Image (tube, helix red, strand yellow):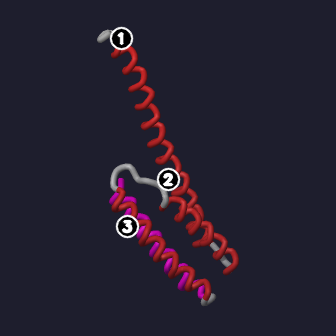
Amino acid sequence: MSKLLPRIYLPALLVCAQLVIGAQMTYAGEIKVAMKDMKRALRGAMASTTMPELSRYVAQLERDADQASRQPYRSDQATYDEGMQKLKLQLAAVDEAIRANDMNEAKQDLRKINATRKHYHDLLN
C-alpha cells in the first residue's frame, strides 16, 4: 500500500502544479495584452488631431485600464493596485479636459500618464 501512494499522489501533484502555473501564465498574459493595448491607445491619443479621435483613444485606454486593474499581479499586488488607481485618477483629469474641449490640457494630462506608466513599470520590473 505504501508503494502505491506515491504512484497515485505524484501524478495528481503534477496535474495540480500544471494548473497553478497555467493559471499564473494566463493572468500574466491577460495583463500583458491589456498593457500593450493601453500603450497603443495612449500613443494614438497623443497623435490625435481632433477631439473625437482623442476621445475614442481615451475611451479605449479607460476600458483597457479597467480590465487590467481587475487582474491579479503576481509579485507586488499593492504597488500594482496603487499604479492602477493613480492611472484612473489621471484618466479622470483627461476626461475633464476633453469635456472642456481643451486638447492641449488633455495631452498634458496624457503625458503625465506616460510618466506614471514609466514609473510603475520601473517599480514592478
Decide which of 39, 4 is in the foreground and name it: 4
Question: Which contiguous range is marked in magenta?
Answer: 102-125
Q: Amino acid at mark 2?
A: Ile
Residue lying at the far bottom in this picture: please name it. 100
Which residue is the site of mark 1?
A: 4
Q: CA distance from mark 3 to mark 1?
A: 49 Å
Query: Residue 115 location, x and y as percent?
Result: 42, 70
Query: Seen in the image, is 2 located left or right of residue 34?
Result: left
Point 41% across, 69% down: residue: 116
Prevailing secondary structure of the magenta residues:
helix
- As helix, strand or loop, the secondary structure at mark 3 comes to helix
Closer to the camera, 84 or 17? Answer: 17
Above/below status of 27 relative to 61:
above
Q: Which residue is mark 2?
A: 31
Which-is-in-front pick, marks 2 and 1? Answer: 1
Q: Amino acid at mark 3?
A: Glu
Return the residue at label 3.
82
Residue 84: x %, y % from top left:
44, 66
Q: In the image shown, does 122 or 11 lie closer to the viewer?
A: 11
**Residue at left 36%, top 11%?**
4
Q: Quadrant of residue 11?
A: top left
